[in-house]
C-alpha cells in the first residue's frame, strides 16, 4: 500500500495536533450519542474529506476496493484490524483508527464475553484447554462457518461484523512481546471437519503454522487418554503482568469467569493434569498433519 505524509488540515475545519504532529479527528458538533462503530465511521469519513481525497482516489492509493471503503465510512462493515493499521499509516494518525476499531469491535461482542475479552487483552500468559477450536486460532472462513451455525438470526452484515470481531482478537498474538499461549485441543475438535474440505484444510494448516510461532504451544489430548477432570467444557487460565490470574469456564452457550485465587488454583491443577496426559508439542503437530493427510486423500 502506498504511504503518504500526514495531510494538511482542510481550511475552515477545526483540528488538533499532538506533539508528534499527528492529526486528530474533531468531535461531532451535535449532541447525538454515537456508538463506537458510528464514531469510527465518522472518523474515517472526516479524515478522507480533510485529506481532499475521493473514495476512488483513496481506493487507488491504498489498494482497497472502493465499495468496501464506502461501507466502512457508512458504518455498514467492521474491518479487519490490519485495514485500520494501513489507514492510520496512510493518514498519519498514529494508532487512532486502530483504537477506535477496538472499541467498535467490543460493541459487537456478546456482553457475557466482554469481561473475559478484557482479561485476555491484558494477559501475558494463557493456558487453554479447548473442546472447540479456539477463536484465537480460527481462520476467517472457519469462524464464519461456526458463527453462521449459531441460532442467532444475524443478517449477512451482522454476521460479517461478528467474524471481523472474532478474527480481530488475534491481533494480540502479533504484539511485541506476544503473550505466551499454550492450547490443548481435545481430539474431538480435530475429528469434526467443516462441510467444505478447503475450509477445513486451511484451518488445519493454520493450526500447524500457529504452532510454529515461538510464543504458541499446541498440544492434543487424544481419545485414548480416557475421562478427565475437564471433560465437557473448555477452560482458559489467563495471567496478567502483575501475576494475578483468572479462570474462564465455557460450556454450550454458557460461560463463567472467576477471579477467586483458590478457585483459579483448583482449575490450574486440573489443567496441569490434562497437560501431562496430552501428547508432546511435536507429537501433537504430527497428529494434526496426519489428519491433514487423511482429509486430502
Image: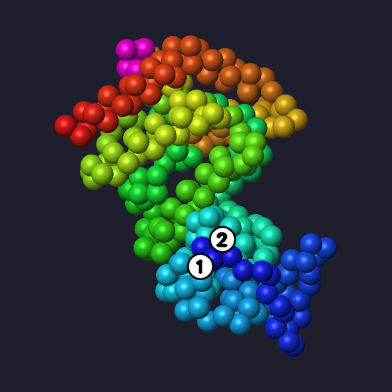
Between 274 and 70, the one nearer to me in the picture: 70
> Magenta residues?
222-226
Q: Is residue 238 magenta?
A: no
Q: Residue at x 74, y 88 (%)?
A: 12
Q: Residue at x 20, y 34 (%)?
A: 296
Which is more N-terminal, label 2 or label 1? 1
Evaluate whether residue 121 shows in this view: yes
Residue extending furthest bottom? 12
**Where in the figure is residue 158, as x and y percent of width and height?**
43, 61
**Where in the figure is residue 155, as x and y percent of width and height?**
38, 63
Between 178 and 263, the one nearer to me in the picture: 178
Q: Measured along the vertical axis of the image, is residue 275 above or below residue 30?
A: above
Residue receiving disc 1: 62
Q: Secondary structure at mark 2?
A: helix
Q: Residue at x 47, y 79 (%)?
A: 56
Residue receiving disc 2: 86
**Left or right of residue 252: residue 9:** right
Q: Measured along the vertical axis of the image, is residue 38 above or below residue 216?
A: below
Amino acid at each position: 500500500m502506498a504511504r503518504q505524509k500526514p495531510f494538511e488540515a482542510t481550511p475552515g475545519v477545526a483540528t488538533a495536533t499532538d506533539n508528534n504532529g499527528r492529526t486528530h479527528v474533531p468531535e461531532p458538533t451535535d449532541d447525538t450519542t454515537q456508538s463506537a462503530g458510528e464514531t469510527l465511521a465518522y472518523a474515517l469519513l472526516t479524515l478522507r474529506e480533510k485529506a481532499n481525497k475521493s473514495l476512488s482516489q483513496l481506493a487507488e492509493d491504498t489498494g482497497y476496493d472502493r465499495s468496501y471503503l464506502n461501507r466502512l465510512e457508512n458504518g455498514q462493515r467492521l474491518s479487519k484490524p490490519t485495514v485500520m493499521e494501513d489507514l492510520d499509516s496512510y493518514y498519519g494518525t498514529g494508532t487512532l483508527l486502530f483504537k477506535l476499531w477496538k472499541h467498535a469491535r467490543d460493541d459487537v461482542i456478546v456482553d457475557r464475553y466482554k469481561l473475559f475479552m478484557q482479561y485476555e487483552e491484558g494477559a501475558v500468559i494463557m493456558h487453554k484447554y479447548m473442546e472447540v477450536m479456539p477463536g484465537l486460532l480460527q481462520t476467517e472462513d472457519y469462524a464464519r462457518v461456526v458463527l453462521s451455525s449459531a441460532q442467532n438470526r444475524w443478517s449477512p452484515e451482522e454476521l460479517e461484523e461478528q467474524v471481523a470481531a472474532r478474527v480481530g482478537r488475534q491481533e494480540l498474538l502479533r504484539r511485541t512481546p506476544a503473550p505466551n499461549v499454550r492450547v490443548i485441543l481435545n481430539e474431538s475438535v480435530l475429528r469434526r471437519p467443516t462441510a467444505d474440505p478447503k475450509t477445513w484444510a486451511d484451518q488445519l494448516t493454520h493450526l500447524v503454522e500457529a504452532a510454529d510461532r515461538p510464543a504458541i504451544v499446541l498440544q492434543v489430548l487424544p481419545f485414548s487418554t480416557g475421562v478427565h477432570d475437564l471433560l465437557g467444557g473448555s477452560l482458559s487460565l489467563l495471567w496478567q503482568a502483575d501475576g494475578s490470574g483468572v479462570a474462564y469456564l465455557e460450556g454450550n452457550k454458557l460461560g463463567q469467569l472467576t477471579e477467586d485465587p483458590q478457585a483459579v488454583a483448583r482449575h490450574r491443577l486440573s489443567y496441569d493434569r490434562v497437560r501431562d496426559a496430552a501428547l508432546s508439542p511435536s507429537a501433537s503437530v504430527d497428529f494434526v498433519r496426519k489428519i491433514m493427510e487423511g482429509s486430502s486423500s
